[in-house]
Image (cartoon, coloured by chain):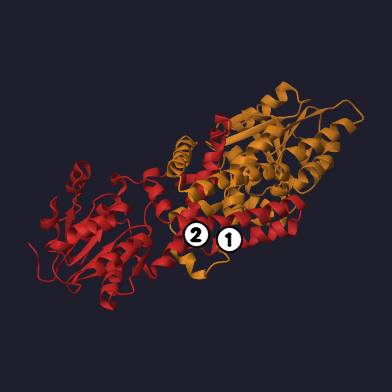
Chain colours: A red, B orange
Amino acid sequence: MKRASEKTVVIIGMGLIGGSLGMALRRARPKVWRVIGLERGPSSLALARRRGACDKIFTNWREGVRDADEIVICTPPSQIVPVTRRVLPWIKPGVVISDAGSVKGPVVAGWSHLQKAAASPIKYSFVGAHPMAGSEKTSWEHGTATFFEGKACFVTPLPATSQPAAAAVAGFWRGLGMEVATVDPERHDEIVAHISHLPMVLASTLCSLLASKDPSWRGYAGGGLRDTTRIAASDPRIWKPILEQNSTQVLHALREYQAEIKALEAALTEGDWPRVTAMLERAKAYRDGVRT
Amino acid sequence: MKRASEKTVVIIGMGLIGGSLGMALRRARPKVWRVIGLERGPSSLALARRRGACDKIFTNWREGVRDADEIVICTPPSQIVPVTRRVLPWIKPGVVISDAGSVKGPVVAGWSHLQKAAASPIKYSFVGAHPMAGSEKTSWEHGTATFFEGKACFVTPLPATSQPAAAAVAGFWRGLGMEVATVDPERHDEIVAHISHLPMVLASTLCSLLASKDPSWRGYAGGGLRDTTRIAASDPRIWKPILEQNSTQVLHALREYQAEIKALEAALTEGDWPRVTAMLERAKAYRDGVRT
């Protein structure tokens, strides 16, 4: 039963993010959302049911989205725009369509294209979002109702997005305990290339190098190596599309980083210890100020 | 009172490592070591007393070392050889001298020199050691009696070291729950350049790059950035000497690493996604096999 105060959110894709989102929304007090899940994969479907990740679950597009006040697309990134196109015919006017993808450029381009191609006056709003939650453990079993609490979330409205729609999406994630930052989609992709994709690339290339060394070395790892490389244990099926969709910004960040390494290499080669120390101190000061 | 079964270990330098070592040895059951501390810094001295890190503490070299069966030098790396020279006149025959430094080349060179310069037949043994314990928190307050448990420890005998002396040092650390690997000093420095110093350099250069960006970005950090850069919060006064003492091996590892980055950059530039995926998979397979 839908109560008068409730709005309906439809989560498309009940994986780690979508499932955790459903659990978080259903357990929120006061509960303001009726949660509908739309999922076709049998194992995710079963898990979503078992863990109570939604009030109702559908496999049919039309049935799934027709009551939606807000739609959050939590599919793999390459599916966000195709899924949007698929559900547009069935939504009611005024729906806010959002997502949870790690890269915003291609999604925003696809959505803008859909908006321009719409024959009738636009009856929905697009607002990208990127909750910075997740870990190297990317399967459903690691989902929790507190998955988003205390973490950062980007909200990236399109130029054509109405202010109320952007505010609605910001409020949606803020209601789950996230700290919301509203930025341009392009700026978002530049930021995450540096603070998320570059760290992943460094961790992975370090592991890739060490994989060529004597296998016995693995047994000597201390806490430094373990933490530095933790994210390299992530699923390549998650990360390859991220690197692909954000390759321009990732390459830019990677080139800046190589200049930083070159500078340190020069200081080490020249035995310029004040310069080495200055770099270590700059790094420590930065790290001490990072959100923990 | 010294019991008949006890041997005396003298820990020189009661900082994070030396203090934790004392606490671990004193709390071990069965207790086989009488623990003497040698420390001149007033604050470390006070903390060692307060936390019960040794049975007795001295500030005088002669008094401190005269009963030693084993000496473990836990000073900053640059002090290990000078301290050794300082205590040699006061030790009794048969003492095993060891350390806990992160780089072995310079210590081993210094010790070999002392051995060759000795006028009388050598009455002591040198055995380098490097317990791979520690964190970015390098002050005494983070010391614990379980600091070493379950971690890796390198033991690096000199060519002239007797087998019983090397076995004694290996047994010493094994008695604290460490997994001991005996390797050449040169090999040790190559290994730690890759699995410890390179990760630190990558974390620090990443932070150094990010320090040049908009300060607001710090607030967006997710778990990936946090873990990848944790070690960059370490004290530069600890790390500058490590990079200095091991600069040849660190530079070698850093150049290998840059080749790895270059290869990934090429794959990203060319949009060679199978190659990107292969790198991510190689990295994940490596990371999944790392000691945790």
Mark 1 lies on residue: B209
Q: At label 2, which amino acid type do we have? A: His
- Is A124 on the left or on the right of B198, as rendered? left
Q: Position of residue A4 (x, y in %)?
A: 10, 71
Q: State the mark number for residue A194.
A: 2
Identity of the residue drawn at 22% across and 45% down: A44
Q: At label 1, which amino acid type do we have? A: Leu
Identity of the residue drawn at 54% across and 33% down: A219
> Mark 2 touching mark 1, by CB under 8 A?
yes
The residue most toward the left is A1
The answer to whether one can see residue B241 in this image is yes
The image quadrant that residue A132 belongs to is: bottom left
Quadrant where the N terminus of chain B sits is top right
The residue most toward the bottom is A163
Identity of the residue drawn at 25% across and 68% down: A115
Q: Secondary structure at mark 1?
A: helix
Q: Chain of mark 1?
A: B
The image quadrant that residue A90 belongs to is: bottom left
